[in-house]
Image (cartoon, rainbow, N blue to C red):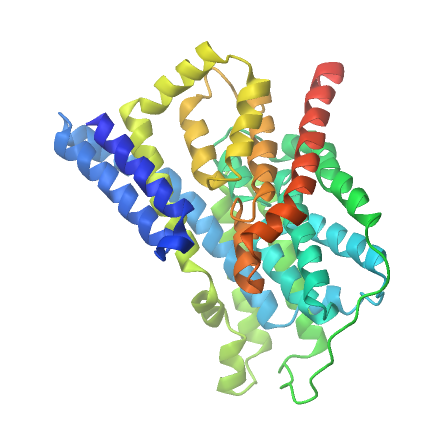
Amino acid sequence: MITIMVVIFVLGYIAIAFEHPININKSATALLTGVLCWTVYILMGSDSHLINEQLTEHIGELSGILFFLMGAMTLVELIDAHDGFDVITSRITTNNKRKLLWIICIITFFLSSVLDNLTTAIVMVSLLRKLIDDKEDRLLFIGMVVIAANAGGAWSPIGDVTTTMLWIGGQITAQNIMLKLFIPSVLCLIVPLVILSFKLKGSVTRPEIKENASPNPTTSFERNAVFFLGIGALVFVPVFKTITHLPPFMGVLFGLGVLWVITEIIHSKKDDEDKDSLSVLHALRKIDMSSILFFLGILIAISSLQSTGVLASLANYMNESIGNLNIIVPAIGLLSAIIDNVPLVAASMGMYDLTTYPADSYIWEFLAYCAGTGGSILIIGSAAGVAAMGMEKIDFIWYLKKIAWLALIGYFAGAFAYMGIEYFFHL
């Protein structure tokens, strides 16, 4: 039984990794993999009632992650519909390549920590299309955006889905992860940014502005109000969790509900066509449901292996054969450049229990950093990279030659910084 489940799991992973060559969406593969693993488990298992209880328990845990993602993505779509991000883009005036690169990367780094790396990458790629006309220059900037988005997401509990998973699962706390991973995450970005800055010269050419573009039916007050309220709702989530002790998805749903009421009020006098494009219902139709279904499929697949005890056995084997977390955890991060970091973190959460490694242990913090930033090494290794690849048709080999080595240097710079801080200061 376990062998069959592992084979299904591995084949599913291969299909996900080669999503583009085989032309099958990874969400479809993930869903099939998850359902098939549980199907084999219950058909060949000895206690179907127990297995159903295990599945129900796992779904209860996973639903928190899915509802959080849905709420956060809807808030971001609502801000975008109001052109709220113009609050940032309108203030960027320089055409100098070096200055612009630093501005874009710093904005991406901090924006990713507040939103998430996927959404931030989408926003910044859209921004760069308005700022840089030359395709080669723009791709270089987008490559650094991927690194910055993943680095910025790693040190925030809401910046990366894997960090969010660890936060919701109780492996890390919001305040501690922000304190411990900020410096490693900064180095992960700054080191490649400094290296690339020495290679950049001259100015960028901005694309011509299209005069026939239709105006957005919002006022300046409405754009600013929705932007700051939306960002505020996301920032408020950790505060809400600390005050109420309710899971984070309740906080993000609360923020969405508040903004929903406010937007209904401020657009009440607009005509139906304008009102519809600015509504939460319209934002809900635009969120990437395929990504949410991918997370669902891959997480229930992981949970099936966790329920059989396979992951616990794997943890014991790794501890006995390797034993050094300073080797195991960075290896997981490097592996996340090939395989999506969501299932890797989910597997790690199943392999190492909270009894042995309580909240805010070395392993969980280091895992949050490595899994969050290791995906930058390859374009297919992170949600931010895949989004950028799809939007700008970035070639895998081009990214490997131009960006991968920078991401690798930054990854190890941050990893060694984290290990050094822990070793010398025992924070």
Q: Quadrant of residue 123?
A: bottom right
Q: Is residue 153 above or below residue 73?
A: above
Q: Is residue 303 visible?
A: yes
Q: Tell whether 419 sits left or right of 74.
A: right
Q: Is residue 103 above or below residue 281?
A: above
Return the residue nearer the eye: 42 or 217: 42
Q: Tell whether 117 sits left or right of 423.
A: left
Q: Is residue 258 visible?
A: no
Q: Position of residue 267 (x, y in %)?
A: 57, 78
Q: Position of residue 59 (x, y in %)?
A: 32, 41
Question: Hey, which residue is sitting farthest top in the picture?
Answer: 320
Q: Position of residue 348 (x, y in %)?
A: 45, 28
Q: Quadrant of residue 154?
A: top right
Q: Quadrant of residue 140?
A: bottom right
| Residue positioned 69% across, 50% down in the render | 144
| Residue positioned 59% across, 32% down in the render | 370
| Residue positioned 74% across, 80% down in the render | 208
